[in-house]
Image (cartoon, rainbow, N blue to C red):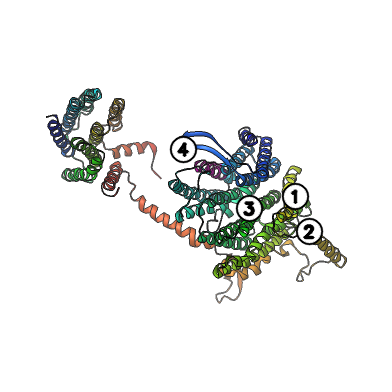
Amino acid sequence: MDLFTAGFASMMGGALLRSRVLTLLACLLIAGAAGIFLTENQTITATFYEIVPGLSFAVHIDRLAAFFMLTIAAVSFCVSLYSVEYINQYKHKGLLISLMNIFILSMLLTVAAGNTFSFLFFWELMALSSFFLVMFEYDNDKTRKAGLFYFIMTQLSTLFLFIAFSLLYSYTGTTSMEKIILQEKSTFLFLALFIGFGIKAGIIPFHKWLPYAHPASPSNISALMSGVMIKVAIYGLLRFLLVLPAELWWGLLILGAGTVSALLGVIYALKEHDIKGLLAYHSIENIGIIYMGIGLFVIFSHYNVPALAAMSMAAALFHTLNHALFKSLLFLTAGHVVHTTKTRNIDEMGGLIRQMPYTALLFLIGAMAISGLPPFNGFVSELLLFQALFNASAVHNPIIELVLIICLSLLALTSALAAACFVKAFGMIFLAMPRSAQKTHEASWPMLLGEGLLALACVILGIFSPLYLNSLGYALPNMMFIGGALLFSILFFFLLARANTRYCETWGCGLISQTPRMEYTASGFSEPIVTIFSTIYNPQKHVSKEFFDKSQTLVREGHVEFHLMRFFEEYLYMPIANAAMVIASRIDTLHQKDMGAYIAYVFIAAVILLLWVGWFA
Amino acid sequence: MIDAAIKTIFVLLYVTVAFIMTRRDIISLISTYATQSFLLACLAGLLYMQERHATLLWLAALILIIKMVLIPSTIRSIQKKMKRDMEFAYVSPTGSLMLSIVIILLSYGALSHLLRELGLGQLFALGAITGVSFTMMGLVVIFSRKLVLTKIIGYLAMEDGVMIFSMFVAELPLIIEALILVDLFMLIILSTILALGMETTIEEVHKRLQVLVGEEK
């Protein structure tokens, strides 16, 4: 407990003194304390400050909370190390340090919250501090739009959580995390929790804020938001799901939402050319994978298959940790690329491996890990999930078995598409020739150290985690052997290919000089996939031409616009927003400059209250 | 005997509030308000004779000094020109009277069984219903009158309702009563100054202030 207190105090000190050293120290202290908690299986509950009886700031740290605190602190340490150098480019770097410290502290305290009041308080603090961080480059129009979108969605999330916690209090009569155990089934409570946490996690269809907010933030903040903030929502869902009497349809809903999010997340990522937008869509995909694990846990628990339920939960938790590591790594490397090239469009990059080989290597590790390739950590957690899905027959219900097999096939498709997407991303950013005139340089050593630690964790967890998991009874392959075999195969084919390679200029359709515009583009790469999934993308082409003659035979100039449908924005968000506007305009007619009108409203409300008291109360 | 006197005062209080709702003559309005305050002070005195709470005696004295003398005389000294208030909104004086009958019946219907459950005697239940009705009728006066001065009378009628309710149901500590009276006294002075003349409506003040602020976007 002392270590935690010292860590929280250091983080607070870092925020007040704007000290990067204190941030690093705080992360180390909290990671250390959480690590001890995990190994020793301790639980602590303490009340810090009681505002009124029954309403207090309290902490409750058990193994689940410690796991998430370790994840947050470890990733925050690497991000803070990276930020030592990265934030120097900003004018108000002191403010950025303070806000970042408050943001990290609020995430940690949300996870450590001992009652629903503390949880909601720190959840809101997390939402507000992250909102200010999203708006940090507020002079950009897109940033302001992203900030507004994020603010509305995050407040909506808080509203649903408030409803859920109120219901929970009415059922149990307590706000304490430790004492909340609910016997009766409550659909409304579950739905409120599902929507509240789903919005923050970025699950489809509540995901729309994510591709706006993550690219708009400074890259170190994107890494924190995508790497750990959305995991706080996963923690919240798990924390309350474990104390509620779950029903089968809850599991099916979570599994369904997870599968749809995983598949659509990667499909949307494939057509994205903004590197940070692409990574944001992959966050949706990976949150979907985590949700699949949680959904499977509920389903297997319902059918009383504890071994598979535990495997699904292990997959979900391990993927939570893994995603936090490789997504932060990818955002940090992408952040340096964006900073040095001054663009987020991957079609304007290319050939960066020559100027920044270390960054390229680190990005490659992150890309392979997120694509679920061995021997990296992403592979292990996805393999656990695949194994759980392969055992669908254990539920002895043909319909549920069919559902699980469909989810299995869609997860396989998701993994394949994720690999394709990162082939595109790595190829377009680092390989071939530069597509625009850029003066780029390698990242400084603190930035590389922060990224390097995350990459090292991806490798170590990938290789050594199966040893630990196998000791618990799982059957995972020896990753050291697989990694060695893969490395050997790659080296073999690379050397073989190099021996038979003939270097010459590509045929340029008869043109004498070739320009970077003739290179393979991200649009070209994703064109076959856009064609395959045209039902989802619903591409629309608008062609306008101007002619020299009236009979329209000689074209003077033409203009082509290519749009992909934003399904959820057009068919879900906009109708809701329009309905809200209509209701608001109706209510607006009640607004008058006459004070007497408002008094009359008070009078009518008093009459209604009297009627209610007299005949309905 | 005391009960009968209290019931009589209730009837007289209803008459005064009916006058406040319908009178156009400003001087008469102020006099009616002073009469209502006197009746309130009598009510507090009668209750003291029944309950023997010194607080009620203090309350009666405060009502006499502030609500019967100080506030009416302040309003009289501020307003010089205005003689009549002819401006009504939403409901006419006759409509207000009809509405107040509905309010009394509604309050009785809504609160009678509730107050019975609380174990209040018939007289005290009647006092509570009268208090709520007065508050509601005060609201009607505020939104149905346009001039600031008559709106102020509405606020005062509302405050009387709160006072009657507290006397019969939940006796407020004297200090709170005193504070309410002082607040009201300040409200009258401020509203009068803000009104920039007794013939002004709140909307006219808004227009005058808008000249200084500029046009609304």
The residue under label 4 is which amino acid type?
A: Gly
Quote the CA–CA distance across marks 3 and 2. Answer: 23 Å
- The percent position of residue B71, horizontal first and vertical second, equals 23, 26
**Mark 2 Cα-neighbour bin, 10 Å: few <14, some 14–19, many ≥20:** some
Closest to the camera, between mark 1 and mark 4, is 4
Q: Amino acid at mark 3?
A: Leu
Q: Which mark is residue A456?
A: 1
Question: Could you tell me residue B39's position as x and y percent?
Answer: 16, 29
Secondary structure at badge 3 equals helix
Q: Main secondary structure of the magenta part?
A: helix
Q: Residues within 10 Å of mark 1 (few under 14, many from 20)?
A: some
Residue that badge 4 annotates = A54
- Label 3 to label 1, Cα distance in Å? 19 Å
- Give the Cα distance between marks 2 and 1: 14 Å
Work out whether mark 3 precedes mark 2 in sequence or the reverse, and give the earlier one.
Answer: 3
Which mark, by number, is residue A483? Answer: 2
Residue A247 seen from this side: yes
Task: Tell me if residue A291 comes above or below residue B183 in the rendering.
Answer: below
Residue A174: horizontal and vertical position, in percent?
A: 47, 43
Q: Chain of mark 2?
A: A
Local secondary structure at mark 2: helix
Element assignment for label 1: helix
Let me know if residue B34 is in the magenta part: no
* Nearer to us in this view, B156 or A515: B156
Report how far apart the C-alphas of labels 1 and 4 lie in the structure.
45 Å
